[in-house]
Image (cartoon, helix red, strand yellow):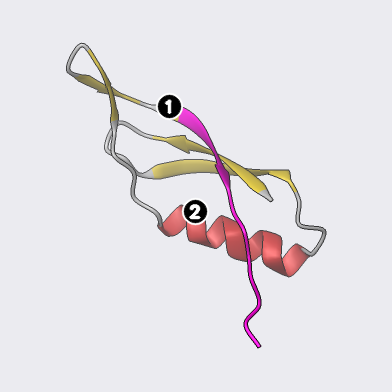
Amino acid sequence: MDVRVLVDARGAPRETVVVRSSGYPRLDEAALATVRATRFKPYAENGVAMPFWVVMPLIFELES
């Protein structure tokens, strides 16, 4: 599954959107919660931090 996230100039996620679903709503919600809890390295252009969009692929594995 893939989640698109808008990261602000401080590295915090601001908007999250599922772009490729797992097919299971509970897994999609878990992925969104994971991305919302992630802190990113801010993107900088000419030394100035700027917001940016990134697509994060997420893989869930079940352990037996």
Specify the farthest residue to the top.
46
Residue 24 drawn above or below residue 36:
below
Gap between marks 1 and 2, in whole Å? 14 Å
Classify mark 1: helix, strand or loop: strand
Q: Quadrant of the C terminus?
A: bottom right
Q: Residue at x 65, y 45 (%)?
A: 2
Q: Residue at x 65, y 62 (%)?
A: 29
Residue 63 lies in what quarter of the image?
bottom right
Quarter residue 38 falls in = bottom left
At 76% from the left and 63% from the top, the residue drawn is: 25
In the rendered image, which quarter is residue 13 located in? top left
Front position in the image: 35 or 63: 63
Side of 13 relative to 47 (left or right): right
Q: Which residues are magenta?
A: 53-64
Mark 1 or mark 2: whose residue is earlier in sequence: 2
Amino acid type, residue under disc 2 in the picture: Val
Question: Magenta stretch: residue 55 in it?
Answer: yes
Residue 5, numbered circle = none
Q: Position of residue 57 (x, y in %)?
A: 59, 46
Please provide percent x and percent y for residue 60.
Answer: 63, 65
User: Which residue lies most toward the front here?
Assistant: 64
Instruction: Give the residue pinned by disc 1.
Output: 52
Number of callouts in the render? 2
Residue at the extreme bottom of the image, as rendered: 64
Identify the amino acid type marked 1.
Phe
Q: Residues within 10 Å of mark 1 (few under 14, many from 20)?
A: some
Q: Position of residue 54 (x, y in %)?
A: 50, 33
Q: Please tell me how crowded label 2 is: few (under 14), some (14-19), or many (20+) other residues with Cα within 10 Å.
A: many
Residue at 50% x, 60% y is 34
Q: Which residue is mark 2?
A: 35
Is 4 drawn above or below residue 32 in the view shown?
above
